[in-house]
Image: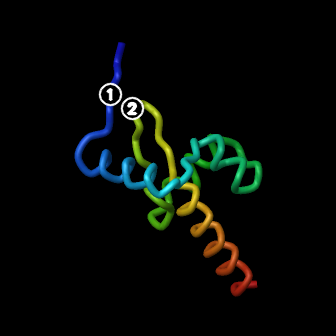
């Protein structure tokens, strides 16, 4: 059984987010939140963008702070609106 726990800065970030009550989204949840795209599309075209929030690895699973994903989505939508 592998029970890897985050250590160092990852553990501090996780504890701080839990105390602040921040929610975490899986890749599937991020994909749904960003418009019902597939998990694969999210991981291959959005999560890898340099300006997309960094994921926190929680064992074998990656999770993104919901507040950071929301902020990124708002900024992306505003930029797209200005470009149109």
- Label 2 SS: loop
| Residue that lies at the very extreme toward the left in this rendered image | 8
Furthest-front residue in view?
A: 19
**Position of the N terminus by quadrant:** top left
Quadrant that contains the C terminus: bottom right
Q: Residue 56 location, x and y as percent?
A: 41, 47
Query: Does 25 sit left or right of 9 as displayed?
Result: right
Q: Which residue appears at 41% of the width and 37% of the height? A: 58
Residue 2: quadrant of the picture: top left
Q: Position of residue 66 (x, y in %)?
A: 58, 56
Q: Residue 61: x and y, percent?
A: 47, 34
Q: At 65% from the left edge and 72% from the top edge, which residue is drawn?
A: 74
Vertical relation: 70 (above or below) 64:
below
Most foreground residue, 36 or 48: 36
Q: Say the numbered circle drawn on residue 4.
A: 1
**Location of residue 53 with respect to 2 vertically, above or below:** below
SS assignment at label 1: loop
Q: Which mark is residue 34?
A: none
Residue at 45%, 49% (x, y): give it: 18
- Local packing at callout 2 (Cα closer than 10 Å; few below 14, some 14-19, many 20+) is few
Query: Residue at horizontal 72%, vertical 48%?
Result: 32
Q: Which mark is residue 59?
A: 2
Contact between labelled residues 1 and 2, with CB atoms less than 8 Å apart:
yes
Decide: few, some or many residues near mark 1? Use Cα within 10 Å; few <14, some 14-19, many ≥20: few
Colour mapping: rainbow
| Farthest top residue in view | 1
| In-image side of 81 versus 7 (left or right) | right
Expressed as whole percent of the image width and height from the top left, the position of residue 31 reads 67, 48
Q: How far is disc 2 from disc 1 in space, using C-alphas?
A: 5 Å
């Amino acid at each position: 059984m592998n029970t890897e726990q985050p250590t160092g800065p990852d553990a501090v970030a996780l504890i701080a987010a839990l105390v602040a009550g921040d929610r975490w989204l899986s890749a599937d949840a991020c994909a749904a939140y960003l418009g019902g795209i597939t998990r694969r599309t999210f991981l291959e075209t959005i999560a890898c963008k340099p300006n997309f929030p960094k994921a926190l690895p929680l064992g074998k699973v990656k999770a993104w702070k919901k507040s950071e994903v929301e902020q990124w989505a708002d900024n992306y939508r505003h930029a797209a609106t200005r470009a149109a």
